[in-house]
Image (cartoon, helix red, strand yellow):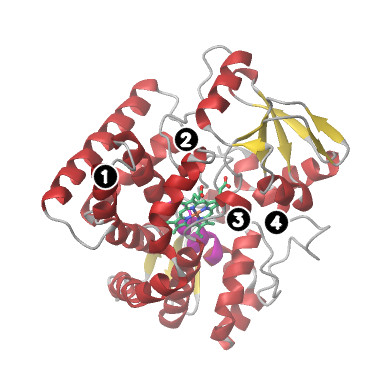
Amino acid sequence: MQAPFVVDPYPSLARLRENGPVSIIHGEGGLAMYVLARYDDVRAALADPRFGQDARRAQELASRRVEGVTLGGDMIHMLNSDPPDHTRFRRLITGVFTARRVAAMRPMVSRITGELLDALDGRDKADLVADFAFPLPMYVICELLGFPPEDRFAYRSWSTAVLTHDPDPEVYARALDEMAAYIAGMLRTRRDSPRDDILTVLVRARDDGTLTEPEIIGMVFLLLIGGHETTVNLLGTACLALLHHPDQHARLLEHPDLMPAAIDEFLRFESPVSMATLRFTREPVDVGGVLIPAGELVLLSLGGANRDPRRFTDPDRLILDRGDPGHLAFGHGLHRCLGSLLGKMEGEVALTALLARHPRFTLAVDEASLPWRNTIMLRGLESLPVVLHG
Ligand code: HEM
């Protein structure tokens, strides 16, 4: 049985918003965390330097309160670092994700999409997550990193164990070790045969002393996660949202040029990263008249902010031509998603091609049996079995 919050988090998020600007929830071992879920507050906090993100500092604060608690920030990367480390990490690979570079990747994304759809030819049923939404971004990030896509299931199992901080310490430790050993091996190979990929950039950065080996491992881990744990959720939940909104589905089939705006609305409606990564207050911060003391852990609900009726009219309805890209699905401020253009482009190419080939698909199972990712941090389907109607 899945927890009701995992299946449908929105009633609870609405209660959090109505409860006041700030609520407190309790995590592992009763660890107290402040939660913000109103759009204006979440947006302001995302860009406020009084909120820190350094994983080591957050761990120290948590350990002081609950002995033995682990937040899982063992790997250091840009998303759990503050400047100047954050700046050093981000600067190194920003160039890979510019609008020009992303536009140049479009044919590659179209080719991979076409191959995945070809593989469905002649089948009347498919799992749109396993057969389509998962492999596409995984192939793309492997191509960018310079990793063999054949190993994708290993990447997936490591990132799941690390992201959900597997409760079995052995599973968790094994995932970390295996991933570190694998990445170290890839770095050795690439040192001998450089290519036009991120791995080669990282090998050079290690050799000229810009990054340490653990920092490289953290960077690869973050890109693997950023590259596939998010876009897969976007594609899966977008397909389900179309099934739930036949009028919007029909409108998109009639007007395929709506797709870029539709992607923003899918991102708002079901934000793939439901909760931003953990922050802490460096000094007391007043949020809507409530004072959060210094040294407190803080969660920012992107999913809650993106359904806030104070910001979006009729927020629980999918309106593909809403024409409002002001959602926070990619975060905001210093840590705003580096891969946002790539994620949106992948979404556009993939959904356009899917709807061109299979304009009408229907659920192949009872809706209640659809499995959701079992974490409050991400919002996505584990699988989406459908009947394809040609
Ligand atoms: C639909 C797809 C995506 C969504 C919804 C998404 C969402 C996000 C969010 C919300 C953050 C900020 C989290 C925070 O502030 O705590 C973030 C950061 C990041 N994302 Fe994405 N992402 C997506 C795709 C990608 C892709 C394709 C890549 C790269 C291949 C990527 C790489 C990153 C990186 C490196 C960061 C860290 C930026 C920093 O700390 O400065 N993302 N993403």
Kindly report which numbered mark, 4 or 1, lies closer to the viewer in this rendering: 1
Comparing 113 with 41, the one in front is 41
Is 158 part of what is drawn in magenta? no
Q: Give percent across and percent down for residue 187.
A: 20, 45
Which residue is under mark 1? 208
Query: Magenta span: helix, strand or loop, mainly?
Result: helix
Q: Nearer the viewer, mark 1 or mark 3?
A: 1
Badge 1: how crowded within 10 Å, few (<14), some, or many (20+)?
A: few
The amino acid type of the residue labelled 2 equals: Thr
Q: Residues within 10 Å of mark 4 (few under 14, many from 20)?
A: many
Residue where numbered disc 4 is placed? 306
Residue 357 is situated, as x and y percent measured from the top left of the image, at: 40, 81
| Contact (Cβ within 8 Å) of mark 4 with mark 1 | no
Residue for point 77% across, 30% down? 284
Q: Secondary structure at mark 4?
A: loop
- Write the residue at 50% across / 48% down: 371
